[in-house]
Amino acid sequence: MQNLHETTLWALLEQTVGAVRTGRLFEALEVHASLLLRASQRVSRGELAQALNMLLFEDVTRRVPMAAAYVGDSVRSHRKLVFDHGALRTVATPCGALPAGERAFRRFLEPLGFQCRGVYPLERLGMTGRAYTHQDLPTAIAQFFVSELHPERFSPEFQLAVQRVVGGSSDPLPEWAAPLLATLSCDGALSFADAVRLLPSLHACFDRQHREPSWADYELLRNESKEMAWIATEGNAFNHATDRVADVAAVADEQRRRGRPVKPEVEVSQSGRVRQTAFYAAMVERLFVGADGSLRTEVVPGSFHEFITRAEEAPGVLDLRFDSGNATAIFQMTAKA
Protein backbone atom coordinates (compact mmCIF):
# COMPACT_ATOMS: atom_id res chain seq x y z
CA MET A 1 0.00 0.00 0.00
CA GLN A 2 1.20 3.51 -0.76
CA ASN A 3 2.30 5.87 1.97
CA LEU A 4 -0.88 7.86 2.60
CA HIS A 5 0.94 11.16 2.13
CA GLU A 6 1.90 10.09 -1.39
CA THR A 7 -1.64 9.36 -2.63
CA THR A 8 -3.91 11.44 -4.85
CA LEU A 9 -6.68 11.25 -2.23
CA TRP A 10 -4.43 12.71 0.47
CA ALA A 11 -3.21 15.47 -1.86
CA LEU A 12 -6.77 16.37 -2.85
CA LEU A 13 -7.94 16.64 0.76
CA GLU A 14 -4.80 18.45 1.88
CA GLN A 15 -5.30 21.08 -0.83
CA THR A 16 -8.90 21.50 0.37
CA VAL A 17 -8.72 21.44 4.19
CA GLY A 18 -5.02 21.32 5.09
CA ALA A 19 -2.69 18.63 6.38
CA VAL A 20 -3.94 18.49 9.98
CA ARG A 21 -7.60 17.84 9.13
CA THR A 22 -6.58 15.44 6.36
CA GLY A 23 -4.50 13.44 8.80
CA ARG A 24 -7.39 13.23 11.26
CA LEU A 25 -9.74 12.02 8.53
CA PHE A 26 -7.41 9.20 7.52
CA GLU A 27 -6.87 8.35 11.18
CA ALA A 28 -10.62 7.98 11.73
CA LEU A 29 -11.92 6.36 8.53
CA GLU A 30 -11.19 3.14 6.67
CA VAL A 31 -10.24 3.78 3.04
CA HIS A 32 -10.22 1.04 0.40
CA ALA A 33 -6.78 0.21 -0.97
CA SER A 34 -7.85 0.92 -4.58
CA LEU A 35 -8.43 4.56 -3.58
CA LEU A 36 -4.90 4.91 -2.23
CA LEU A 37 -2.98 5.21 -5.48
CA ARG A 38 0.24 7.15 -6.03
CA ALA A 39 -0.38 10.87 -6.49
CA SER A 40 -1.07 11.86 -10.08
CA GLN A 41 -2.50 14.73 -12.05
CA ARG A 42 -5.74 12.78 -12.67
CA VAL A 43 -8.41 12.24 -10.03
CA SER A 44 -10.84 9.38 -10.61
CA ARG A 45 -14.53 9.74 -9.83
CA GLY A 46 -14.05 7.25 -6.99
CA GLU A 47 -11.28 9.31 -5.40
CA LEU A 48 -13.35 12.50 -5.70
CA ALA A 49 -16.43 10.75 -4.25
CA GLN A 50 -14.37 9.41 -1.36
CA ALA A 51 -12.90 12.83 -0.63
CA LEU A 52 -16.38 14.38 -0.55
CA ASN A 53 -17.68 11.64 1.73
CA MET A 54 -14.79 12.09 4.15
CA LEU A 55 -15.48 15.82 4.40
CA LEU A 56 -19.18 15.18 4.98
CA PHE A 57 -18.41 12.65 7.70
CA GLU A 58 -16.20 15.26 9.34
CA ASP A 59 -19.09 17.74 9.21
CA VAL A 60 -21.21 15.43 11.36
CA THR A 61 -18.45 14.89 13.92
CA ARG A 62 -18.01 18.68 14.18
CA ARG A 63 -21.75 19.30 14.67
CA VAL A 64 -22.67 16.29 16.83
CA PRO A 65 -20.84 15.97 20.18
CA MET A 66 -21.78 12.29 20.58
CA ALA A 67 -20.34 11.55 17.13
CA ALA A 68 -17.10 13.29 18.07
CA ALA A 69 -16.90 11.33 21.32
CA TYR A 70 -17.57 8.04 19.53
CA VAL A 71 -14.98 8.75 16.84
CA GLY A 72 -12.49 9.75 19.52
CA ASP A 73 -13.01 6.43 21.29
CA SER A 74 -12.44 4.57 18.04
CA VAL A 75 -9.26 6.46 17.19
CA ARG A 76 -7.83 5.85 20.65
CA SER A 77 -8.57 2.13 20.32
CA HIS A 78 -7.04 2.10 16.80
CA ARG A 79 -10.31 1.02 15.16
CA LYS A 80 -11.10 2.84 11.94
CA LEU A 81 -14.75 3.50 11.18
CA VAL A 82 -16.37 2.06 8.06
CA PHE A 83 -18.52 4.88 6.68
CA ASP A 84 -21.65 3.10 5.46
CA HIS A 85 -23.94 5.93 4.36
CA GLY A 86 -24.93 9.53 4.92
CA ALA A 87 -28.49 10.84 4.80
CA LEU A 88 -29.88 14.21 3.75
CA ARG A 89 -33.32 15.74 3.30
CA THR A 90 -34.72 17.75 0.41
CA VAL A 91 -38.09 19.25 -0.54
CA ALA A 92 -39.85 18.29 -3.77
CA THR A 93 -41.06 21.80 -4.54
CA PRO A 94 -39.76 24.89 -6.38
CA CYS A 95 -36.78 26.11 -4.34
CA GLY A 96 -35.76 29.32 -6.05
CA ALA A 97 -32.40 28.91 -7.81
CA LEU A 98 -31.87 25.46 -6.26
CA PRO A 99 -33.21 22.48 -8.26
CA ALA A 100 -36.19 20.89 -6.52
CA GLY A 101 -35.82 17.85 -4.32
CA GLU A 102 -33.31 15.13 -5.01
CA ARG A 103 -32.46 16.62 -8.43
CA ALA A 104 -30.21 19.11 -6.62
CA PHE A 105 -27.99 16.15 -5.70
CA ARG A 106 -28.54 13.71 -8.55
CA ARG A 107 -26.95 16.26 -10.92
CA PHE A 108 -23.53 15.63 -9.35
CA LEU A 109 -23.93 12.26 -7.62
CA GLU A 110 -24.33 10.53 -10.99
CA PRO A 111 -21.16 12.09 -12.49
CA LEU A 112 -19.34 11.04 -9.32
CA GLY A 113 -20.27 7.44 -10.13
CA PHE A 114 -23.33 6.99 -7.92
CA GLN A 115 -26.46 5.29 -9.20
CA CYS A 116 -29.94 5.16 -7.67
CA ARG A 117 -30.31 1.52 -6.62
CA GLY A 118 -33.47 1.73 -4.54
CA VAL A 119 -36.57 3.87 -3.96
CA TYR A 120 -38.15 3.69 -0.51
CA PRO A 121 -41.62 5.11 0.22
CA LEU A 122 -41.75 6.79 3.63
CA GLU A 123 -45.50 7.17 3.68
CA ARG A 124 -45.91 8.03 7.36
CA LEU A 125 -43.54 10.95 6.89
CA GLY A 126 -44.89 12.18 3.55
CA MET A 127 -41.49 11.49 2.01
CA THR A 128 -39.64 9.28 -0.48
CA GLY A 129 -36.11 8.03 0.03
CA ARG A 130 -33.58 7.12 -2.67
CA ALA A 131 -30.37 5.19 -2.14
CA TYR A 132 -27.39 6.18 -4.31
CA THR A 133 -24.67 3.52 -4.46
CA HIS A 134 -21.25 3.92 -6.05
CA GLN A 135 -20.86 1.78 -9.17
CA ASP A 136 -17.10 1.21 -8.80
CA LEU A 137 -16.85 0.39 -5.09
CA PRO A 138 -20.39 -0.15 -3.75
CA THR A 139 -19.36 -1.54 -0.36
CA ALA A 140 -16.33 0.71 0.20
CA ILE A 141 -17.60 4.18 -0.78
CA ALA A 142 -20.41 5.35 1.48
CA GLN A 143 -23.90 5.46 0.00
CA PHE A 144 -26.16 8.52 -0.01
CA PHE A 145 -29.73 8.19 1.27
CA VAL A 146 -31.48 11.20 -0.27
CA SER A 147 -35.03 11.83 0.91
CA GLU A 148 -37.64 14.17 -0.55
CA LEU A 149 -40.52 15.66 1.39
CA HIS A 150 -43.76 16.10 -0.59
CA PRO A 151 -45.50 19.31 0.59
CA GLU A 152 -48.68 18.52 -1.37
CA ARG A 153 -49.42 15.74 1.12
CA PHE A 154 -49.89 18.33 3.86
CA SER A 155 -52.28 21.22 4.51
CA PRO A 156 -52.50 24.34 2.31
CA GLU A 157 -51.12 26.43 5.20
CA PHE A 158 -48.17 24.06 5.47
CA GLN A 159 -47.47 24.34 1.74
CA LEU A 160 -47.45 28.14 1.93
CA ALA A 161 -45.03 28.03 4.85
CA VAL A 162 -42.75 25.67 2.91
CA GLN A 163 -42.62 28.16 0.05
CA ARG A 164 -41.86 31.03 2.41
CA VAL A 165 -38.96 29.03 3.85
CA VAL A 166 -37.33 27.42 0.80
CA GLY A 167 -38.81 29.35 -2.13
CA GLY A 168 -35.89 31.76 -2.29
CA SER A 169 -33.07 29.23 -1.95
CA SER A 170 -29.75 29.92 -3.62
CA ASP A 171 -27.74 27.40 -5.62
CA PRO A 172 -24.25 26.77 -4.20
CA LEU A 173 -23.11 24.97 -7.34
CA PRO A 174 -21.61 27.59 -9.71
CA GLU A 175 -22.23 27.59 -13.45
CA TRP A 176 -18.62 26.66 -14.18
CA ALA A 177 -19.18 23.32 -12.40
CA ALA A 178 -21.49 22.02 -15.16
CA PRO A 179 -18.77 21.41 -17.80
CA LEU A 180 -16.53 19.80 -15.18
CA LEU A 181 -19.34 17.42 -14.20
CA ALA A 182 -19.94 16.67 -17.88
CA THR A 183 -16.25 15.78 -18.26
CA LEU A 184 -16.43 13.63 -15.16
CA SER A 185 -19.47 11.81 -16.56
CA CYS A 186 -17.74 11.20 -19.87
CA ASP A 187 -14.19 10.38 -18.74
CA GLY A 188 -14.69 9.13 -15.19
CA ALA A 189 -11.92 11.47 -14.04
CA LEU A 190 -10.83 15.11 -13.82
CA SER A 191 -7.50 16.84 -13.80
CA PHE A 192 -6.14 17.37 -10.30
CA ALA A 193 -6.55 21.14 -10.64
CA ASP A 194 -10.21 20.80 -11.68
CA ALA A 195 -10.92 18.34 -8.85
CA VAL A 196 -9.40 20.75 -6.32
CA ARG A 197 -11.61 23.50 -7.74
CA LEU A 198 -14.79 21.41 -7.77
CA LEU A 199 -14.62 19.67 -4.40
CA PRO A 200 -15.39 22.72 -2.19
CA SER A 201 -18.42 23.57 -4.34
CA LEU A 202 -19.76 20.01 -4.00
CA HIS A 203 -19.18 20.18 -0.27
CA ALA A 204 -21.07 23.48 -0.08
CA CYS A 205 -24.21 21.78 -1.44
CA PHE A 206 -24.64 20.02 1.90
CA ASP A 207 -25.78 23.02 3.88
CA ARG A 208 -28.81 25.27 4.30
CA GLN A 209 -29.38 27.30 1.14
CA HIS A 210 -32.20 29.53 2.44
CA ARG A 211 -32.42 32.35 4.98
CA GLU A 212 -33.42 31.99 8.62
CA PRO A 213 -37.08 30.92 8.84
CA SER A 214 -39.59 32.80 10.91
CA TRP A 215 -40.45 31.26 14.26
CA ALA A 216 -44.12 31.25 13.27
CA ASP A 217 -43.41 29.24 10.11
CA TYR A 218 -41.15 26.87 12.02
CA GLU A 219 -43.90 26.13 14.55
CA LEU A 220 -46.46 25.65 11.78
CA LEU A 221 -44.18 23.22 9.94
CA ARG A 222 -43.27 21.36 13.13
CA ASN A 223 -46.92 20.75 13.95
CA GLU A 224 -47.39 18.77 10.73
CA SER A 225 -43.90 17.50 9.90
CA LYS A 226 -40.93 17.50 12.23
CA GLU A 227 -38.85 16.51 9.21
CA MET A 228 -39.78 19.69 7.33
CA ALA A 229 -39.15 21.75 10.47
CA TRP A 230 -35.68 20.18 10.58
CA ILE A 231 -35.08 21.16 6.94
CA ALA A 232 -36.13 24.73 7.82
CA THR A 233 -33.17 25.09 10.19
CA GLU A 234 -30.60 22.60 8.84
CA GLY A 235 -31.35 22.56 5.10
CA ASN A 236 -29.48 19.89 3.12
CA ALA A 237 -26.81 19.17 5.73
CA PHE A 238 -26.16 15.52 6.51
CA ASN A 239 -28.98 14.46 8.78
CA HIS A 240 -26.76 11.63 9.99
CA ALA A 241 -23.64 9.66 9.16
CA THR A 242 -23.41 5.93 9.84
CA ASP A 243 -20.69 3.59 11.03
CA ARG A 244 -20.93 0.00 9.75
CA VAL A 245 -20.19 -2.29 12.69
CA ALA A 246 -20.08 -6.04 13.27
CA ASP A 247 -22.70 -6.07 16.06
CA VAL A 248 -24.93 -3.03 16.35
CA ALA A 249 -26.55 -4.22 19.60
CA ALA A 250 -23.19 -4.65 21.30
CA VAL A 251 -22.07 -1.19 20.15
CA ALA A 252 -25.31 0.35 21.46
CA ASP A 253 -24.89 -1.40 24.83
CA GLU A 254 -21.33 -0.10 25.12
CA GLN A 255 -22.45 3.46 24.35
CA ARG A 256 -25.16 3.21 27.03
CA ARG A 257 -22.55 2.04 29.54
CA ARG A 258 -20.65 5.21 28.71
CA GLY A 259 -23.76 7.23 29.53
CA ARG A 260 -24.54 8.29 25.97
CA PRO A 261 -28.12 8.78 24.69
CA VAL A 262 -28.80 5.84 22.34
CA LYS A 263 -32.13 4.82 20.86
CA PRO A 264 -33.51 1.98 23.04
CA GLU A 265 -34.54 -0.22 20.13
CA VAL A 266 -32.54 -1.78 17.31
CA GLU A 267 -34.48 -1.51 14.05
CA VAL A 268 -34.47 -4.72 11.99
CA SER A 269 -35.30 -4.79 8.26
CA GLN A 270 -37.97 -7.10 6.86
CA SER A 271 -35.18 -9.28 5.45
CA GLY A 272 -33.59 -9.49 8.89
CA ARG A 273 -30.20 -8.65 7.37
CA VAL A 274 -30.01 -4.92 8.16
CA ARG A 275 -30.00 -3.74 11.77
CA GLN A 276 -29.75 -0.10 12.85
CA THR A 277 -29.80 2.21 15.86
CA ALA A 278 -28.48 5.68 16.63
CA PHE A 279 -27.69 8.39 19.13
CA TYR A 280 -30.43 10.93 19.67
CA ALA A 281 -29.93 14.13 17.70
CA ALA A 282 -27.75 16.89 19.09
CA MET A 283 -29.61 19.98 20.25
CA VAL A 284 -28.37 23.13 18.53
CA GLU A 285 -28.99 26.86 18.70
CA ARG A 286 -30.47 28.39 15.57
CA LEU A 287 -31.65 31.88 14.62
CA PHE A 288 -35.26 32.64 13.73
CA VAL A 289 -37.08 35.77 12.64
CA GLY A 290 -39.52 36.91 15.31
CA ALA A 291 -42.91 38.53 14.85
CA ASP A 292 -41.33 42.00 15.09
CA GLY A 293 -38.71 41.17 12.44
CA SER A 294 -35.84 40.83 14.88
CA LEU A 295 -33.72 37.69 15.18
CA ARG A 296 -34.18 35.33 18.12
CA THR A 297 -32.34 32.18 19.17
CA GLU A 298 -34.04 28.87 19.91
CA VAL A 299 -32.72 25.39 20.67
CA VAL A 300 -33.84 22.79 18.12
CA PRO A 301 -32.81 19.27 16.99
CA GLY A 302 -29.73 19.01 14.80
CA SER A 303 -27.99 15.97 13.31
CA PHE A 304 -27.04 12.61 14.83
CA HIS A 305 -24.78 9.59 14.42
CA GLU A 306 -26.02 6.12 13.48
CA PHE A 307 -24.74 2.52 13.65
CA ILE A 308 -25.64 -0.24 11.21
CA THR A 309 -24.90 -3.95 10.83
CA ARG A 310 -25.31 -5.51 7.39
CA ALA A 311 -25.37 -9.25 6.78
CA GLU A 312 -24.60 -10.98 3.49
CA GLU A 313 -27.52 -11.70 1.16
CA ALA A 314 -25.39 -14.26 -0.68
CA PRO A 315 -21.88 -15.59 -0.04
CA GLY A 316 -19.54 -12.63 -0.35
CA VAL A 317 -22.36 -10.18 -1.22
CA LEU A 318 -23.19 -7.64 1.47
CA ASP A 319 -26.82 -6.52 1.63
CA LEU A 320 -26.59 -2.79 0.88
CA ARG A 321 -30.35 -2.23 0.79
CA PHE A 322 -32.30 0.04 3.07
CA ASP A 323 -35.71 -0.56 4.63
CA SER A 324 -38.64 1.88 4.73
CA GLY A 325 -39.61 0.85 8.25
CA ASN A 326 -36.06 1.20 9.55
CA ALA A 327 -35.64 4.58 7.85
CA THR A 328 -38.93 5.91 9.24
CA ALA A 329 -37.93 4.90 12.77
CA ILE A 330 -34.40 6.28 12.46
CA PHE A 331 -35.74 9.59 11.18
CA GLN A 332 -37.53 9.96 14.50
CA MET A 333 -34.18 10.62 16.18
CA THR A 334 -34.51 14.27 15.21
CA ALA A 335 -38.16 14.34 16.30
CA LYS A 336 -37.50 12.88 19.76
CA ALA A 337 -34.37 14.85 20.54
Image (cartoon, grey):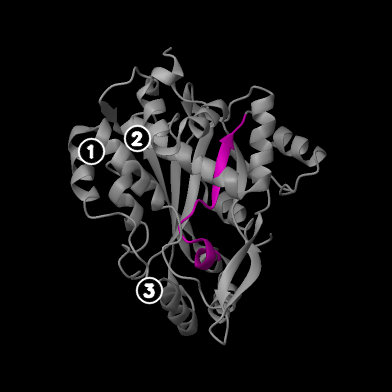
Where residue 298 appears, as percent x and y from the top left, is 65, 70
Identify the secondary structure beneath mark 1. Answer: helix
Please, what secondary structure does the residue beneath circle 2 have?
A: helix
Quadrant in the rendering for residue 96: bottom left
Residue positioned most to the top: 1
Placement of the C terminus among the 4 image quadrants: bottom right
For the N terminus, give its image quadrant: top left
Q: CA distance from mark 3 to mark 1?
A: 30 Å
Distance of label 2 from label 1 (alpha carbons): 10 Å
Q: Is residue 332 above or below residue 68?
A: below
Pinpoint residue 141: horizontal percent, then vertical percent: 43, 33
For disc 1, the neighbor class at 10 Å (few under 14, some 14 to 19, many from 20) is: many
Based on the picture, tell me whether residue 233 belongs to the magenta stretch: yes
The first of marks 3 and 1 along the sequence is 3
Query: Where does the magenta region start and end?
Result: 230-245
Circle 3 is placed at which residue position? 167
| Mark 2 closeness class: few <14, some 14–19, many ≥20 residues within 10 Å | many
Task: Say what amino acid the circle numbered 1 marks.
Answer: Leu
Q: Amino acid at mark 2?
A: Leu
Q: Is residue 329 visible?
A: yes
Q: Residue furthest bottom?
A: 292
Going from the N terminus, do you reach mark 2 or mark 3 first? 2
Please state which amino acid type lies under the numbered disc 3: Gly
Answer left or right for 68 relative to 140: right
| Residue located beneath label 1 in the image | 184
Q: Tell me what residue is drawn at x 63 percent, y 24 percent.
A: 79
User: Would residue 211 appear left or right of 246 to someone viewing this image?
Assistant: left
Residue drawn where x is 33% and y is 61% of the image = 171
Q: Which residue is mark 2?
A: 48
